[in-house]
């Protein structure tokens, strides 16, 4: 199993990079899947096979819980962490394909004990 976990600051071009990589894989007929882990990304530039938005969205959390954008994003990532078997199963179901994983850009989500780190550690265990 091979893949790329695309992380970086907001506006750095993570989704653009994922779209470009998907285009290249289409041209060379390499099987791949794209996974969007950014629940606030409304402008995905590539065909998304799986998205955290299937589970939860920032907009829904803001409406339902009255949180601001950053609090809602943190809540969404916490929900992903608690339900990471959903993501792991999607990946295991496609273990013969290259993974392109587009991550959120908010740096506070990547602290050493943060929920995204727990999700990434779980990913490493299945590789």
Image: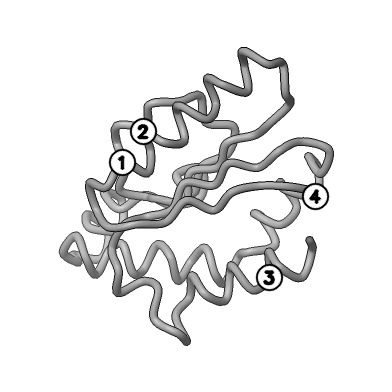
Residue annotated with mark 2: 16
Q: Are marks 2 and 1 in contact (CB under 8 Å)?
A: yes
Place of residue 66 in the rendered image (x, y in percent of width and height, measured from the top left): 18, 65
Q: From the viewer's perspective, is the residue at label 2 or at label 4 nearer?
A: 2
Looking at the image, tell me whether mark 2 or mark 4 is earlier in sequence order: 2
Instruction: Look at the numbered disc 1 and give the secondary structure of its residue.
Output: loop
Marker disc for residue 13: 1
Residue annotated with mark 4: 92
Residue annotated with mark 3: 122
Q: How many marks?
A: 4
Looking at the image, tell me whether mark 2 or mark 3 is earlier in sequence order: 2
Rendered position, 113 above or below 88: below
For the residues labelled 3 and 4, the Cα–Cα distance comes to: 12 Å
Instruction: Look at the numbered disc 2 and give the secondary structure of its residue.
Output: helix
For the residues labelled 1 and 3, the Cα–Cα distance comes to: 25 Å
Which residue is at the far bottom?
A: 113
Looking at the image, tell me whether mark 4 or mark 1 is earlier in sequence order: 1
- Which of the 4 image quarters holds residue 114? bottom left
Rendered position, 117 above or below 68: below
Looking at the image, tell me whether mark 3 or mark 4 is earlier in sequence order: 4
At 21% from the left and 65% from the top, the residue drawn is: 70
Place of residue 93 in the rendered image (x, y in percent of width and height, measured from the top left): 81, 43
For the residues labelled 4 and 1, the Cα–Cα distance comes to: 27 Å
For the residues labelled 2 and 4, the Cα–Cα distance comes to: 25 Å
Looking at the image, tell me whether mark 1 or mark 3 is earlier in sequence order: 1
Instruction: Look at the numbered disc 4 and give the secondary structure of its residue.
Output: helix
At 54% from the left and 47% from the top, the residue drawn is: 101
């Amino acid at each position: 199993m091979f893949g790329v976990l695309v992380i970086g600051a907001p506006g750095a071009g993570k989704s653009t990079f994922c779209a470009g990589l998907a285009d290249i894989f289409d041209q060379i007929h390499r099987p791949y899947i794209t996974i969007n882990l950014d629940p606030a990304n409304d402008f995905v530039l590539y065909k998304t096979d799986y998205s955290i938005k299937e589970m939860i969205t920032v907009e829904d959390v803001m409406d339902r819980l009255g949180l601001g954008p950053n609090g809602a994003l943190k809540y969404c990532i916490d929900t992903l962490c608690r339900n990471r078997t959903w993501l792991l199963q999607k990946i295991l179901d496609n273990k013969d394909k290259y993974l392109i994983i587009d991550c959120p850009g908010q740096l506070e989500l990547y602290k050493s004990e943060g929920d995204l780190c727990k999700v990434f550690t779980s990913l490493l265990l299945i590789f």
